[in-house]
Image (cartoon, grey):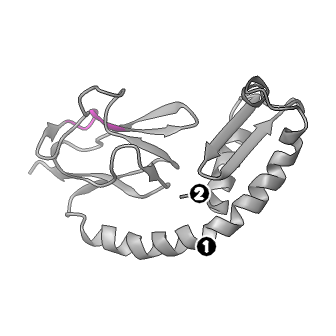
Amino acid sequence: MSLSPDDVKVLVQAFEASDWDEMSVRFGDTALELTRTGRPPTAHAASGAPAAPPAAAPAAVAAAAPAPAAAPSTANSAAAPAAAANIPDGHVISAPSLGLFWRSPQPGAPAFVEVGQHVNAEDTVCIVEVMKLMNHVKAGATGTVAAIVPGNGEMVEFGVPLVVITPDA
């Protein structure tokens, strides 16, 4: 799986809205490196790569992103209705942004929630990680966890269902 042009757009918008000086993202065969300083991002420079390639990085993103976008778009559009058909009725908690879905606060730790577990509206049910920023996602309703849709560590897009809760009566 690679980043689609829409994914890159979301990441650039997140960078522009932040107070970060630089951002480096690598996913599959796509690399995105942004900086406000005009210098190569420090993560890239620290990797031992010469200073010239960061100037070429946007071209690499432009070249890499459109080609793979055709395959994931077809796969995602075919998979989305199938996944939506398997989601039970209830309070659907959607992804707040593009990122990686994590069921626990750290590797080896117990999951925040399990199917069948009772949760309160303010309980954290998962994390969506964007560029090492951990967004704790709250239940938003009191009830029983009916489904956990993505697998641990899967890439999710904005608005996709993460967890379904059957609200208390």
Question: What stretch of residues is rendered in magenta?
Answer: 120-126
Mark 2, residues whose alpha carbon is within 10 Å: few (<14), some, or many (≥20)?
A: many
Using the image, tell me which numbered label, if any, was put on residue 2: 2
**What residue is at 49 percent from the left and 54 percent from the top?**
158
* Amino acid at circle 2: Ser
Q: Is residue 163 above or below residue 129?
A: below
Q: Nearer the viewer, residue 153 or 51?
A: 51
In the rendered structure, the answer to whether residue 94 lies left or right of residue 144 reads right
Q: Position of residue 60 (x, y in %)?
A: 79, 53
Q: Is residue 169 above or below residue 128?
A: below
**What residue is at 46 percent from the left and 44 percent from the top?**
100
**Residue 52 location, quadrant:** top right
Q: Nearer the viewer, residue 121 or 70?
A: 70
Helix, strand or loop at mark 1: helix
Q: Which residue is mark 1?
A: 70
The reply to whether the magenta stretch includes residue 124 is: yes
Mark 1, residues whose alpha carbon is within 10 Å: few (<14), some, or many (≥20)?
A: few
